[in-house]
Every structure is written in structure tokens, then in C-alpha cells.
């Protein structure tokens, strides 16, 4: 009895230790005014993240990660695939500048190079397909030459559309027919060189793309809850959620081609909170809490009982990201732009997430539409479209946090985003005398009017951006006037 208790205590202790070390996140840096690198690294550590994935070799992020104890997966962007594939010297230069230098000079613990990002995505229409495997080979050769190949491994983060199951059962999983040969050669190379396969799985995108997608099947089932009506019976196994089914479809595909030994990690998974009717705090909290509970418990899928490394997408919102995938794309963070938690989330050891420390904000002032101006004034309309082109207005989308504002509220929101993104520089709340600065917070209900980050040294760059903006702005007004004259 006593022996059993001690054994159980040891097992619990080990489980706790393992879970505390198992959190991983994507750190994207496409923001107008990001919190500084050292603040972000402290945020990661305070919340128990010890692995991070970067999409490119961002110097300030990498420098901040030096000697932090955090392991790094470093991305080589798709745009560089062709040059790195075509010339091993280009791969060597990339490794020298972006891996070796940070490892040796800054003490960054780089563990993986992620070659490309979802290069086989169907919507890329094959443009990166030919270059990916040669690029992986050249990066591997460059790592060997740099003496780093024992410590730094290669991977390719792939979108879940590289595999499929024609009858919907995970056990029928196979690679997409047009890239079966490519997938088997790539995974074989990774396997032979100690690499891993990273896969991005997005239940949110499945749900958002299909009005008939069974809602509860997108989430991890709550403990004790009855299984979703949409659960999939596959032989003896009942799949109760789309993540398990999707992951095991990949595992079945790998096994079918004798590649079941490859280590798989989940490169991206998460849920956005704004910019789309399906993107909101309640849904994101439900999905991500279910995900973190699984990560902390280490509970894998029917085919792979141990949870793989899972890089949550994302750590922070990125207000300068492309919105090609949708307006939700700038709102994936489990933290807001300033490192404040968006919602309660229990991470390792049942502890709640904690905010970033040491964040410095710009002055407590906002830019809004002058109260006596009309939102329908053509000059206002063109000012808004200009502001929204540069700044992030995705929270105004229908069903989003600011979707309920009236016309004047919309204008003020756009003006303020522009003003804040430009670092509150003089001239960035000018808008041809249609705007005023106020010290009264215009936030209403769910709609937050931001005060952005004081980025310190970066303000110099933004000052010149604001100056360029002022010039561009006069040009827009001239165009608007010409348009009016033409009418
Ligand atoms: C290092 O990475 C950065 C960011 O992706 C890139 O702009 C740069 O060209 C890379 N250096 C080399 C030598 O390829
Ligand atoms: C691959 O898996 C088999 C069992 O299926 C195992 O015996 C072998 O050691 C594995 N190889 C590697 C490299 O992990
Ligand atoms: C702005 O406000 C109006 C309500 O007056 C609304 O219909 C419109 O869709 C809002 N959003 C944008 C982006 O203009
Ligand atoms: C801005 O508009 C206000 C109100 O119409 C007016 O009093 C003020 O003179 C204007 N300022 C400029 C610089 O045009």
C-alpha cells in the first residue's frame, strides 16, 4: 500500500515535471508596435513556455532568446526556398548568418530549422513544391558543414491539406495524390537525418469554411461530456473531435508508406478571437483550454497515446499580418498585442496565465473624429480608407469586437488605430482637420480603443514613417478632390 502510494506520488511528480516543460508557442513578429523582445521572453518564461517557433530570423527576437533556456525552432521563409534550393552556398550563408552567429555569439538554443512554411498548401498552386526538398537537403548540408547538425535538426511545417481520408475514417489516411512521391521522399530524408515532421492543424478553419461543420466536434470534449453527435467510428475507435481524427489521418498515411517512425510535432494550432463571427473569446477559450489540458496531461490520440510537442498559434496578436486568409488572421494570440491575457487559461500545474511585465505604453490619449464632423463627408470616407490601409481595422468586421459601432465610431476607431500605429507622432492625428486628440477613453462595450506600445528606440523609424505618411496623406486628399471634381 505504502509502496503504491509512493509510486503514485512519483508518477504524479514526474507528470508535473514533464508537463511544466512541455509548453511551446509560435512567436510571430508582424506587429506595428511589438512589445520588446526581452519582455516577450519573460512572458514566455513566466507562463512556462520553454519552446518557441519563429517564422524568420528576427534579430531582436533572437537576441532576446540568448541564454534564456528557451529552445528555438527557426523558420526559413518560403521566399528564400528557391535561392537556398538552387545554391548550397546560399544555404551556407543563411546558416552562417542566421543560425551559427546566434548560437555562438548570443547563446541562442536553436534546435530546429523549419524550412519553408506550409510550402505545399494547395492555394500556392505548387509554386514552392520543386524547391522544398532541395532546400531541405542544402540546409542539412550547411548545418553539417557548420558543425551544428547534431544539435540543430531540419523540419518542414506542413499544412494539414497534405493528407486526406477519402471515406472520412482516419485509418484510411493517405497523402494527397498529387504530392505522394514528394511527401514520401521528404519524410524519408527527415527520418534519415534525425529531423521531425511539423504539421499545422486548424479545427477553426474547418469550422469557419463549412457552415454545416458540426460545432462541438471542433473542440476537445469536456471531461464527462457525451461524445459529439458527429464522432467518427473507425473500427474499435471512436473519434470524438477533429484534432484526434486529423492527426491520426496523418499517422495512418505515414504508416502506409513505411514512415511511421518519424517524430511528428504540431507546428501550429489555436483559435482566433476577433475579425470573424466564429472568432471570439468564448470559442478561443473553450478550444485552447481543451488543448492545454491535453498537453499538460500528455494525452495523445488513439494511434499515438503520447501528446507530441504542440506549438500553440499564437503567443501574441500581430496587427500587421496579411489578411489574405481572413480578418481573423491578426487575432490568434492567447495574449493581446501588449501581452495581457485575453481570457483565463490554466496552463501547467493548474496555474493561470499571467500578463507581460514591464510593458511601456504611449501617452494616454486617443485620436477620434471631430464631434461636429460628419462620417458621411467624402473627405472622411477617404481618410478612413487610407487609415485602414496602413493600420489594422479588422475589429470593425461584422460580428467582431467593434462591429457594433455606429458610423462615427467606425471613423474614430480607424483614426485611432492609425495614430497609435504611427507612435502618436505629431501629424498622425491630422486628417485634414477632421480629427481631434482626446484624453477620454472612447472604448465601448467589447470594443477597445488601444493605447499602443512605447517601443523606445523604434520610435525613430516610426517618426520617418509618419513623415512619409503626411506626404502620402496630402496626395490622397488631392486624389479625393480630383475624384469629386470628376463627379
Ligand atoms: C537571414 O534571415 C533573414 C530573415 O529571414 C533574411 O532576410 C536574410 O537574407 C538571411 N540571411 C541570409 C544570408 O540568407
Ligand atoms: C522504428 O520503429 C521500429 C518498430 O516499429 C523500431 O524497432 C525501430 O527501432 C525504429 N527506428 C527508429 C530509428 O526509431
Ligand atoms: C461602420 O458603421 C456602420 C453603421 O453605421 C456599419 O453598417 C458598417 O458596416 C461599419 N463598418 C465599417 C467597416 O464601415
Ligand atoms: C478646423 O475646424 C474648426 C471647426 O470647423 C475651425 O474652427 C478651425 O479653424 C479649423 N482649423 C483649420 C486649421 O482649418
Image: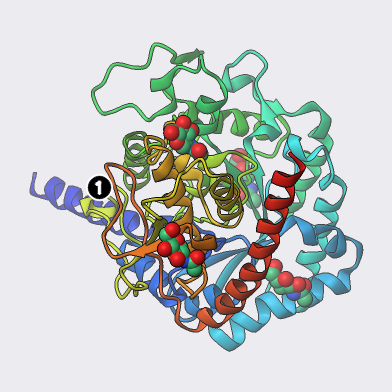
Colour scheme in the image? rainbow
Residue 290 located left or right of residue 327: left
Whether residue 98 is visible: yes
Q: At x 83% / y 36%, what residue is drawn? A: 181
Q: Which residue is mark 1?
A: 344
Percent position of residue 8, x then y: 19, 47
Q: Nearer the viewer, residue 149 or 58?
A: 58
Whether residue 236 is visible: no
Q: At x 48% / y 78%, what residue is drawn? A: 64
Q: Nearer the viewer, residue 32 or 411?
A: 411
> Is the residue marked 1 within 8 Å of ligand 3, measured from its CB?
no
Percent position of residue 226, x then y: 29, 16
SS state under label 1: loop
How many marks do you count on the picture? 1
Figure quadrant of the C terminus: top right
Residue 112 sits in quarter? bottom right
Mark 1 neighbour density, 10 Å: few (under 14) some (14–19) many (20 or more): some
Percent position of residue 343, x then y: 28, 47
Residue 407 sits in quarter? top left
Residue 396 located left or right of residue 6: right
Residue 86 located left or right of residue 351: right
Residue 478 sits in quarter? bottom right
Figure quadrant of the N terminus: top left
Q: In the displayed image of the protein, which residue is found farthest to the right?
A: 86
Vertical arrangement, residue 272 with respect to residue 168, above or below: below
Vertical arrangement, residue 398 with respect to residue 94, above or below: above
Residue 131 located left or right of residue 64: right
Percent position of residue 356, x then y: 32, 67
Q: In the displayed image of the protein, which residue is found farthest to the left?
A: 2
Q: At x 48% / y 15%, what residue is drawn? A: 232
Amino acid at each position: 500500500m505504502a509502496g503504491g502510494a509512493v509510486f503514485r506520488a512519483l508518477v504524479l511528480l514526474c507528470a508535473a515535471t514533464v508537463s511544466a516543460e512541455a509548453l511551446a508557442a509560435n512567436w510571430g513578429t508582424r506587429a506595428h508596435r511589438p512589445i520588446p523582445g526581452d519582455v516577450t521572453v519573460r512572458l514566455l518564461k513566466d507562463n512556462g513556455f520553454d519552446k518557441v517557433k519563429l517564422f524568420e530570423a528576427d534579430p531582436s527576437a533572437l537576441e532576446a532568446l540568448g541564454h534564456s533556456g528557451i529552445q528555438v525552432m527557426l523558420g526559413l521563409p518560403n521566399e528564400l526556398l528557391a535561392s537556398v534550393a538552387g545554391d548550397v552556398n546560399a544555404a551556407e550563408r543563411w546558416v552562417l548568418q542566421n543560425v551559427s552567429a546566434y548560437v555562438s555569439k548570443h547563446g541562442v538554443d536553436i534546435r530546429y530549422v523549419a524550412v519553408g512554411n506550409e510550402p505545399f498548401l494547395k492555394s500556392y498552386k505548387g509554386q514552392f513544391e520543386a524547391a522544398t526538398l532541395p532546400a531541405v537537403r542544402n540546409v542539412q548540408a550547411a548545418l553539417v558543414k557548420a558543425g551544428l547538425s547534431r544539435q540543430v535538426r531540419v523540419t518542414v511545417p506542413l499544412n494539414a491539406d497534405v493528407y486526406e481520408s477519402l471515406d472520412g475514417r482516419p485509418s484510411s489516411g493517405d497523402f494527397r495524390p498529387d504530392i505522394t512521391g514528394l511527401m514520401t521522399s521528404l519524410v524519408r530524408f527527415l527520418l534519415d537525418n534525425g529531423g521531425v515532421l511539423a504539421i499545422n492543424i486548424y479545427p477553426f478553419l474547418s469550422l469557419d469554411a463549412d457552415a454545416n461543420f458540426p460545432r462541438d466536434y471542433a473542440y476537445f470534449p469536456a471531461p464527462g461530456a457525451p461524445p459529439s453527435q458527429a464522432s467518427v467510428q473507425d473500427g474499435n475507435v471512436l473519434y470524438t473531435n477533429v484534432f484526434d481524427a486529423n492527426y491520426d489521418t496523418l499517422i495512418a498515411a505515414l504508416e502506409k508508406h513505411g514512415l511511421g517512425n518519424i517524430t511528428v510535432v504540431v507546428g501550429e494550432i489555436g483559435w482566433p478571437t476577433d475579425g470573424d463571427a466564429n472568432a471570439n473569446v468564448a470559442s478561443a477559450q473553450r478550444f485552447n483550454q481543451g488543448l492545454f489540458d491535453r498537453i499538460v496531461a500528455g494525452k495523445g490520440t488513439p494511434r499515438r497515446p503520447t501528446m507530441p510537442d504542440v506549438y500553440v498559434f499564437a503567443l501574441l496578436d500581430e496587427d500587421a499580418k496579411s489578411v489574405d486568409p481572413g480578418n481573423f488572421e491578426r487575432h490568434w494570440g492567447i495574449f493581446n498585442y501588449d501581452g495581457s491575457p485575453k481570457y483565463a487559461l490554466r496552463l501547467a500545474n493548474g496555474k493561470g496565465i499571467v500578463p507581460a511585465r514591464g510593458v511601456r505604453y504611449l501617452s494616454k490619449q486617443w485620436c477620434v473624429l471631430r464631434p461636429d464632423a460628419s462620417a458621411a463627408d467624402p473627405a472622411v470616407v477617404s481618410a478612413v480608407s487610407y487609415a485602414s490601409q496602413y493600420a489594422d481595422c479588422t475589429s470593425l468586421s461584422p460580428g467582431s469586437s467593434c462591429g457594433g459601432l455606429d458610423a462615427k465610431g467606425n471613423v474614430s476607431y480607424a483614426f485611432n488605430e492609425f495614430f497609435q500605429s504611427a507612435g502618436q507622432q505629431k501629424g498622425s492625428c491630422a486628417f485634414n482637420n477632421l480629427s481631434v486628440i482626446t484624453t477620454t477613453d472612447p472604448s465601448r462595450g467589447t470594443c477597445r480603443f488601444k493605447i499602443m506600445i512605447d517601443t523606445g528606440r523604434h520610435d525613430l523609424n516610426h517618426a520617418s514613417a509618419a513623415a512619409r505618411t503626411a506626404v502620402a496623406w496630402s496626395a490622397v486628399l488631392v486624389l479625393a478632390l480630383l475624384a469629386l471634381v470628376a463627379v
